[in-house]
Structure formats: C-alpha cells, structure tokens
Amino acid sequence: MVRKPTRRRLRISSVLLALATGLLVADALSPSDTRAAARIVKDGGMLTIGTTEFNYIDPALATPPMPGASPWPSAVWPVEDATCARLLRYPVGPPPVRYNLVPEVATDYPAVSRDGRTYTFTIRKGYRFSTGAPVTAGSFANEMNRILNPAMKSPAAQYLQEVVGAEAVQQGAAETALGVKVTGSHLIIQLTKRVSDFPARMTMPYFCPVPPGLPIGPEGVGAPLPGSGPYYIAEFVRGSRVVLERNPYYHGPRAHHLDRLVVQVGGTDTAITDKVDSGELDVDLLTAISRLPELVAKYGVNRTQFWSIRAADTFYVIMNTSRPLFHNNVKLRQAVNFAIDRAALRDAVGHVTGSLTDDYLPPGMPGYVAGHLYPLRHPDLAKAQALARGHTRSGKATLYICDSLACPQHAQIIQANLKQIGIDVDIKLFPYAVVAAKARTRGEPWDLGVTRHDVSYVDPSQFIDLALDGRTIQATGNTDVSYFNSSHYNMLMDRAGALSGSARYDAYGHLAVDIAANAAPLAAFSVRNHRFLISSRVGCVQATAHSGLDLAGLCLK
C-alpha cells in the first residue's frame, strides 16, 4: 500500500488581503529591510528586453506561443502584465511566488450568487488609463465583448463560452452579451452554469480593461495603446520592437521605477542570452539551455543575475489507462511511480530547469498538499518490483515521445527504469507536433508518454478536471491524455467544483493526492522553472505567476 499523505493546507488569509491593498513589499520585508530597500532603489532610466518574437499588443490577441513551438515563452504576457490592471491578479513578490488570487481593480473578491452562476465585481475608484480616462466597470465589459466579437478572432473567446449571450455575439446576432452587465461601479457576469474557476480566468491578460471604441479586427490595434497598469505601449513595430512608457496616471500599489522599457524583437534564444551576459541587453526571459551550466557556475542561482523560479507547468510520465497494459492495473501504475528516476528525467534538461515533484498539483497552488508518496531523488526498486509482481501482463509497452530536446534521453531513462520491473519499452520517436496529436487521439496504440501540462491560468481544476475527467474524452483533441475515466473520481471532481473559497481549494488539494496514491494514472516528476538572466544594471527582481519576472517592478541599480 502507498502510505497516506502528509496534510498541509494553504488558505487565503488576511496577509493576502494586505497584499491586495498594496503592502506587497512591506509584507515581504521587515520594516528596517523595507527602509533599506527604499534607499537603494533609483527611479527613472531605461532597460532593454530581448525576445525572439512578439505577435500582438492587443490584449484580446496577445497570446504566448503554444508549448513545443519555438520560442516559448515570449515577452507578450510579461508586457501585457506591465501595462494592465486586472480585476484580480496573483501576488508579485520575492520568489517563490504563491498563486493565491488577490483583488486589484476589483475592491474585493466577487460576490457569487447562491447557484454559482452570477459574479458581481465592484470596481475600485482611482485607476486611470494613460490617457487620463477612468477605468470603469464598462472598461472590462468592453474587452469581454470585443473578445466575443467574431471579427476579432480572439483565442480568449473559449474562456467566455459559459457567459449568457456569448453564443449570440459569436454568431453575429448581437453586439454585446446579455450576461455582461454594468450597473454603476458593478460589473455583473451571468453564466449559463456554475464555473467555479471563473475568477481565476480573469487573471489572464486577455481581460485587460480597454477604453470604449477600441477597433475590432483580427490584426488587433497598434500603438499607442492606453495602459491601465504602471506602463502603456507607446510604440509597436511588429518583428522589431515594443516600447513601454510610464503611465503618468497610475497611482496603484504595484512597484514601477523605470521611465521606459524597450523590447527588442529578433534573434535566437542563445544570441539573446549572450547579449544579456555581455551587457548589450538587460533582460532575457528564457535563458538558453545550452548556456545554463556556464551561467550557474558564473552567477549562482537566484543570487545576482541568473534566476530560476518555480512555475506552475508540470511534467508527467503518462500511462494510457485505456490500453490493456495499464487498464484496471493500479498496482503496475503505482510501480511505475516508484520505478522512475525523477532526478534523472529532470536533469536530462538541466537541474535548474525544474523542481522535482511527485505531486499532481504544483507547490504554491491554493490547497496544495505535499503528498510525499513516491521517491524524488532515487527510484525505490524494491517497492516498485513488489507492486509490479504478478501485474506486468504482456510485459511490453510502447512509448511515444518527441525526437527533439531532451525527449530521447527521457525515453532511454524510462526504458531502463521499467526494465527493472519487468516491462520492455519499445521507443517510438516523432516530431513534437505529431506525438502531441497522437497522444490526444483516442485509439492510438501507445502505452507510455511524457507530457508537460501547461496552464493559461492557475487553478487546481486546470490540473485535475482538465487532465483527469474521463467525461471529457473524445475522438481527438483530448486533454485527458491518460484516458483516465473513473466514475468515483468524476463524482469527487464535481463535489470539489461545487464548493467555493478555501473549502474548494482544500477539496482539490486532497483529491489530487488521493488520485496520485490510489489510481496513479500519471507519474509527476518535475515542475518547470522560469529561468531568466538580467544584466548587472538590473535590480528590484520580483516574481509573478504568469511570466516569472515582473517587468513593471524592475529598476536600475
């Protein structure tokens, strides 16, 4: 039997409410430290950020590339974050940052109707666009209706599908959704069904407030683009540069010191890393893997210039529970969890690229419970062999995996690990896009895979419901790539989703450990780390959930 987890609960507290009212730095530092920090921070000046690509500045279209694309991630969402004041956001602070929602332009968490279908946000006074115009409830409604407009072709429309009247707008039968209402300082969102993660969706930069009359079109708007956060976009030349300048009307709690940030677009990830290392550029948001050993030796980790900060994206070894080898074979799935060498899998990419885990939820998630179910540093072969004995069936497994990056090394590690428990692994290598499509197509003859589960907003349902709800399985395009389908656990997901606040988070946290311990369709092995390099001129490093580095809060030393 797998031992019972250690229970540790994280709750939204008064400390987080203090964060929401602008006491981020004061909460993170002692009073003497806060005064010392204030003395060394210089206001003014300019920093340059390197990125290999930048597609749109329009918040309705500004989307980071999909995982597996090159490059990933880009500067798009970090820039949107610096220019946008949202209803709710995640805290900004010293790493590692936690993923608790805090109000920003909303005065508090939204009021929720008893049936869970109506959210009412009260808008805080005092926020202004860089034009001087006030940010109102209507500013948020404007963006939601722009996103739903079919001419916009916004990828964010999927996150508003449950809004009453969304379909009518998308079909061109209405200009505004009936379920998006403004009454004075109140933004009221009515949904067709309970969507318990709706507040978390509002943290995405898609839902930045915008002034009325902003043009609608699939190419988005150009610059200057009014900003509601510490900065606004003063210039945008696609494929060349993006220029951010300070919003003179921003008086919110978020730190902002620089007069200007310039994003230079183009070049390879290695070239950008080299330019930051030499001082030609100031910020590299995705440090080249090939340079990691040198940079760690030169700067250390999280000390001066090289940073590696835990994100939410999680790597898993997948077991296809619809195939004969793993179907109704919990013992063998548990055996795989004890047999895999998590440290070797992580280190195949680089030890600073990820944080070891055996948990289905990433640390820092509200409700996260540290399960301590499976070994992190070394396999427990005795336990794995005992569990596998009598349950290896054919003793053969087919592994589908990508043919680039660290995938071939991962394949060799998994093959060697499972040989120890009586499973012969046949490796099939494909281009990333091909193997991703095959994994999401029902009936493909694979037994094992490796995936990185990426989320656009951080909520436990995005790891549990999205990856493990068997009722979502379809012919193609599955997110439940282990094809796990348990009526018992489907019911528990429904129960967790029907709760609210800390009770909901706690339910998901313990459900994640329950599934990992007693069903084990996945073997989590690493949480991806944001990794970035800054020049010796850069100070005031703060972490954010979406992009790792808070561009708005940077300063010159």
Image (cartoon, rainbow, N blue to C red):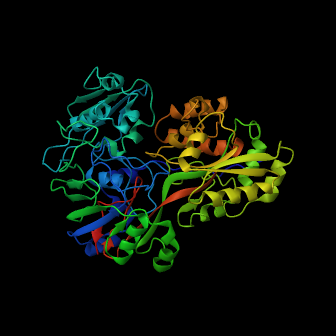
Query: Residue 471 sits in which quadrant?
Result: top right
- Side (left or right) of 541 relative to 183: right
Residue furthest bottom as drawn: 298
- Side (left or right) of 184 relative to 20: left
Residue 203 in view in this figure: yes
Residue 273 lies, in percent from the top left, at: 40, 69
Front residue (pair 143, 443): 443
| Quadrant where the image shows the C terminus | bottom left
Residue 285 drawn above or below residue 80: below
Residue furthest right as drawn: 390
Front residue (pair 509, 67): 67
Residue 21 in view in this figure: no
Residue occupying image coordinates x 17% and y 36%: 213
Residue occupying image coordinates x 43% and y 28%: 116
- Side (left or right) of 495 relative to 331: left
Residue 92 drawn above or below residue 154: below
Residue occupying image coordinates x 26% and y 59%: 241
Residue 277 lies, in percent from the top left, at: 39, 75
Query: Residue 207 sits in which quadrant?
Result: top left
- Side (left or right) of 98 relative to 449: left
Residue furthest left as drawn: 132
Residue 116 drawn above or below residue 248: above
Residue 548 drawn above or below residue 294: above
Front residue (pair 19, 92): 92
Residue 124 lies, in percent from the top left, at: 24, 43
Q: How many marks?
A: 0
Residue 166 lies, in percent from the top left, at: 34, 26
